[in-house]
Amino acid sequence: MNNIYSEGFCSKHNEYKNELFCLTENKAICYKCAYHDCSNHQKKEIETLKNEKKNIYISNIENLKLLTEKIKKEFEELKFEYEETKRLKNKLIQDINIKFNELINFISELKSKLIIKIENFFNTNDYQNKINKLSQYSLKDITEEKNLKLKKWNELNINSMNKEILNIENDLKKINDIIQKKEKKKEQNLLSINESAFIKIINFIKESEFEFFNDNYLYFNFQKGENYELSKNGKIATKNKSGNSWNCTIFGDTKLPKNKICKWKIRLNKFSMKSGNFWDICIGVGPYSKNNLNSYNNNCWSFICGCSKLSIKSGNEINYYFKENKPLKEGDIIEITMNMKIGELSFSVNGINYGIASKNIPIDIELYPIVLINDLQESVEIL
């Protein structure tokens, strides 16, 4: 539509200026052409068309600005996520190095203590002194003493003298037997010490609270979503919008691996029960679906943290049962164990095992860690 901007007078009627545009013939015309040649055609004033075109350009520019801002914001978010991921990776490597250095230092310290204990145990100075004294009292000395006694007390009975000598020889034999028994006992004690040290190391590793020793521990963060805010590291979620209602579903960002037993821990950082809702907070597993995002329904399997009771609910069943008349409180830790081999879900609260809560959970679908919060300002944290 370049002819829109044509100026000047009509080429057919020189005395008239081009003030209209024929949309049918796509050209600028004067009022006389509009009356005679283009009477049945669609027409508009050139100034009106210019304004419409100008408005379209302005609208496109505004849309481009909004798109630019959106792209810039998404770029900043991606940049932040990249830096956070990089930081988490470096922290994990640092933690692993620290923990293994602690273990190496512990083993080195244990080794030094063990060596010192063995050296102290095998300190032979006392035994050497006794042996030196015994060696000085040799058979030759005994014979000389015998001769002296014979010479000095020749009036004594010879049989009595021989008996005394035999007693001395028996004493030497007994001493020798005692020494041999002590040496044998030392060897047995050494084996016992080594075995004890080895058992201590194994128990240290087994009983260690370092989660990276546990192949079954599930590492994940919370996903971003509606009606709650996350900490920078993605480990803490707090409901901050939309009142006291089941409209806050929080998923983990890692799906449960097939054919494995997965464990993770959730702590109740803030647990107020403002609304008095009986369930209030639910913790468990479920598929990432639209229904689960919008509200709590039977497509989840979870531990229900009730107002003053603990109860366990199976996602595919309407019925649920109370486990204990014992209220939960802030700081309580719930450990979730999901057996993806056979579809069994169990829970522990503060180290107390509540057994298997749900069986026959479908393991052919993708399941995620899930937390549902009812009351405002309640908060949970991944440990």
Image (cartoon, rainbow, N blue to C red):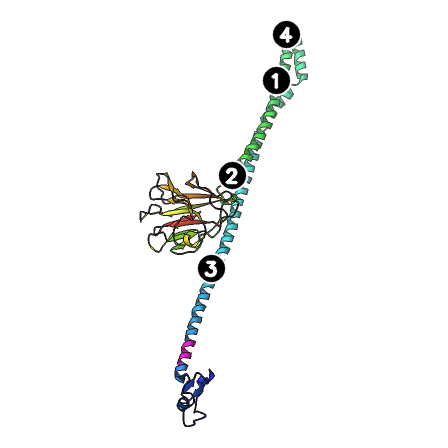
Alpha carbon distance from label 3 to label 2 = 37 Å
Residue 233 painted magenta: no
Residue lying at the far front in this picture: please name it. Answer: 40
Which of the marked residues, 2 or 1, is nearer the chain's N terminus?
1
Q: Which residue is mark 1?
A: 174
From the viewer's perspective, is 334 left or right of 101? left
- Tell me which corner region of the image, top left, top right, bottom left or bottom right, holds residue 115: top right
- Secondary structure type for disc 1: helix
- Res 270 seen here: no
Alpha carbon distance from label 4 to label 3 = 103 Å
State the residue at coordinates (40%, 48%). Answer: 298
Magenta residues (range): 51-56
Which of the marked residues, 2 or 4, is nearer the chain's N terminus?
4
Q: Which residue is mark 4?
A: 160
Q: Which residue is mark 2?
A: 206
Relative to 225, residue 5 above or below: below
Which of the marked residues, 3 or 1, is nearer the chain's N terminus?
3
Q: Which residue is mark 3?
A: 80
Alpha carbon distance from label 2 to label 4 = 68 Å
Secondary structure mainly formed by the magenta segment: helix
Image marks 3 and 1: residues in contact by CB distance under 8 Å: no
Q: Using a 10 Å C-alpha cutoff, classify the residue at mark 4 as few (fewer than 14 neighbours), some (14 to 19) or many (20 or more).
A: few
Alpha carbon distance from label 2 to label 1 = 47 Å
Three-letter amino acid code at the position of disc 3? Phe
State the residue at coordinates (41%, 56%). Answer: 225
**Is 144 or 250 nearer to us in this picture?**
250
**Is 94 or 337 nearer to us in this picture?**
337
